[in-house]
Image (spheres, rainbow, N blue to C red):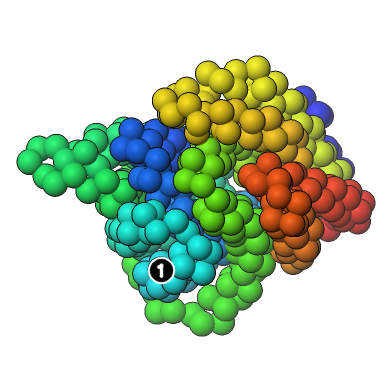
Amino acid sequence: METMPAKRHITQTIKLSLPLIISQIAVVAMTFVDTVMAGRLGSVTLAAVAVGSSLWATAILFLFGILMAIPPVISEMHGAEKHHKIAPFFRQALWLALFLGIFFTIVLLLLDPLFQFFNTQAEVIPEAQGYLHALAWGVLPLSFFVSFRYLADGLSITKTTMYVSFLGLALNIPLNYILMFGKLGLPALGARGCGYATAIVLMVQMLAYIVIVFKHKVIGRYEVLKHFEAPDWSEITRFFKLGFPIGVSMFAEVGFFSIITLLASSLATETVAAHQIALNFSSLLFMVPLGLSMGITIRVGNAVGRNNPIDIKNAGFIGIGMVLFTQLFSATITIAFATLIVSLYTNDAAVGAIAVSLLFYAAVFQLSDGIQVASAGALRGIKDMNFIMLSNIFSFWLLGFVASWYLCFERNMGAEGLWIGIIVGLTAAAILNTVRFFMKSKVAV
């Protein structure tokens, strides 16, 4: 059986992942812009965007996770040259995207009681609610946009997402400026304006991808939107069962970070703002291993389609090694330039001092975070979705959350205790996922 040399695995993973990394950076750069511009309106608005975006991320990434089953299915069909199956499968995935979009729009509008439950500071709640309600308009466009993006990813066409992501970033900055600060005769909407800007960007990105699906020389051949088909409930159910563990695993991971932010919201407003700065910058750096993880999924999925166990193992572990290298670099940058990084977000000395201290913990957890997401990408490639789900629930909630709560509130360590708990959860997930892929790749199909 012919296998690929390590050099080709590296070059192919970079070729696939680089546009995905750039795309993810552009996506998180939107959050970076939101955070920086909110910070210019004061610590209350910054805290509102921090708390609101944490709830948004929890709900939306559950949707992302379910639809994340699209790339490994399509990449396996593509690797096995079963091209005729791709369009019918994807049309059923679009029906699921519609149902999920409607469902999560409703969910986002019903999250207000959580602010009281987590004792969010009273002055933050009105702006955080307005931000979430405005964002709700973008859920359905996002659901379709993500589906089209994952179709392209599964076909190993990753540059289109990069272009569409840059389009979103280019639109987000002026829309934020107009709606948040009240320009062109419009009222200053603050955090609510930030939410509306994001919703508009998501609508434009969805429309852009529809054009791409029709016009792209490769994607267009599959004619996925040539006609519509009635829902095939057996196919939708089968796909949902495949994607649901990914959704739960992402919900467990992102929900963990969101709950940590909500726990932090009961602390001083300056601490909430500092936590958001450290978490936002960490999220920006996380896009590199996340993009590589998506490339690893595609590479492993293609090897599964070719029924090549050696390439399955090599594609996974070479990718994990590449991620470890990038994380060592980003951790060094974070520690070396912590003060400069914080100065980009805020001029508030109290907020800045706390944020600099939290960036040290952010640098430490980047190693575990990169390895856990890379190994999870390898496991998605072999469709070992259930293990990722169980690993995340155990690591983030039974270990990470308990450690964060205990250290923050029982040991009175404040935000630093929360971040040590994050490191505990990420480290456990990294160990479990890597060991699991090692064991499964020994007997991969």
Element type at mark 1: loop
342 vs 376, nearest the viewer: 342
Q: Quadrant of the N terminus?
A: top right
Residue 161 spot, x, y in % from top left: 45, 41
Q: Residue at x 43, y 29 (%)?
A: 348
The amino acid type found where label 1 is placed reads Asp
Q: Is residue 425 visible?
A: no
Residue 444 spot, x, y in % from top left: 85, 55
Q: Mark 1 highlights which residue?
A: 112
Above or below residue 438? Residue 135 is: below
The image shows a total of numbered marks equal to 1
In the image, taking residue 172 as reference, residue 243 lies left or right, namely right
Q: Quadrant of the C terminus?
A: bottom right
Q: Residue at x 54, y 56 (%)?
A: 266
144 vs 56, nearest the viewer: 56
Name the quadrant containing residue 128. bottom left
Q: Is residue 289 visible?
A: yes
Q: Residues within 10 Å of mark 1 (few under 14, many from 20)?
A: some
Name the quadrant containing residue 383. bottom right
In the image, taking residue 422 as reference, residue 441 lies left or right, namely right
Above or below residue 445? Residue 237 is: below
Q: Residue at x 59, y 71 (%)?
A: 239
Above or below residue 238? Residue 30 is: above
Residue 304 spot, x, y in % from top left: 75, 53
Hey, which residue is sitting farthest left in the picture? 185
95 vs 357, nearest the viewer: 357
Q: Residue at x 74, y 57 (%)?
A: 410
